[in-house]
Amino acid sequence: MTGPSNPRREHAGTNPPTPVRHTVDTLNSDALDELYDDRDRLRAQLSDMTRDRDRWKWYRDDAERRVRVQRGRAEVAEDAISRVRKATANSFMAGPNAVDAVRVADVLAALNGPKETK
């Protein structure tokens, strides 16, 4: 049976090389310019990532709003279907050959829902 693996030993050759660390004595103008360029590049990347994050947050919020609207519409439709079923529950005759005697006005009234009183 083998013991626990050592992740440092397994990935020893796969790590990127460590950048040169400058001291005050070894820092020259070219190295300083490179550091400033790296800083500016990283700031630009951060700005892009922040903009992308904000854009995706807006898309997510917009999708959530649309879902809420669709849920509301589905609830209204389900209520209307329930009212139509209730209005058509009383048929004129019973049996497999029954003819439902439901007036169109009753179905339309059920679909439209109850009148709001002011």
Image (spheres, helix red, strand yellow):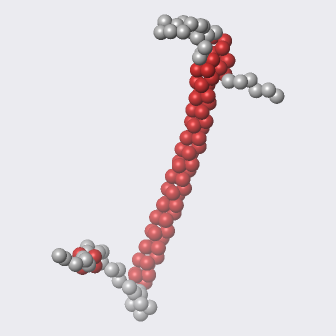
Question: Which sits in the foreground, 91 or 39?
Answer: 91
Residue at the limit of the structure toward the front, as seen here:
95
Question: Which sits in the foreground, 94 or 3?
Answer: 94
- Expressed as whole percent of the image width and height from the top left, the position of residue 38 reads 43, 73
Quarter of the view holding residue 116: top right
- Expressed as whole percent of the image width and height from the top left, the position of residue 77 reads 59, 28
Residue at the limit of the structure toward the right, as seen here:
118
| 34 relative to 45, above or below | below
Question: Which sits in the foreground, 82 or 31?
Answer: 82
Is residue 73 found left or right of 27 in the rendered image?
A: right
Residue under the image location 40 percent in, 87 percent down = 22
> Quadrant location of the N terminus?
bottom left
Q: Does residue 66 appear in the picture of this structure? A: no
- Expressed as whole percent of the image width and height from the top left, the position of residue 60 reads 53, 49
| 26 relative to 45, above or below | below
* Tally of numbered tags: 0
- Expressed as whole percent of the image width and height from the top left, the position of residue 83 reads 63, 23
Is residue 1 found left or right of 84 in the rendered image?
A: left
Q: Does residue 103 appear in the picture of this structure? A: yes
Residue at the limit of the structure toward the bottom, as seen here:
25
Residue under the image location 66 percent in, 12 percent down = 105
> Quadrant location of the C terminus?
top right
| 91 relative to 8, above or below | above
Is residue 34 found left or right of 7 in the rendered image?
A: right
Quarter of the view holding residue 111: top right
Residue under the image location 43 percent in, 78 percent down = 35
Residue under the image location 60 percent in, 25 percent down = 82
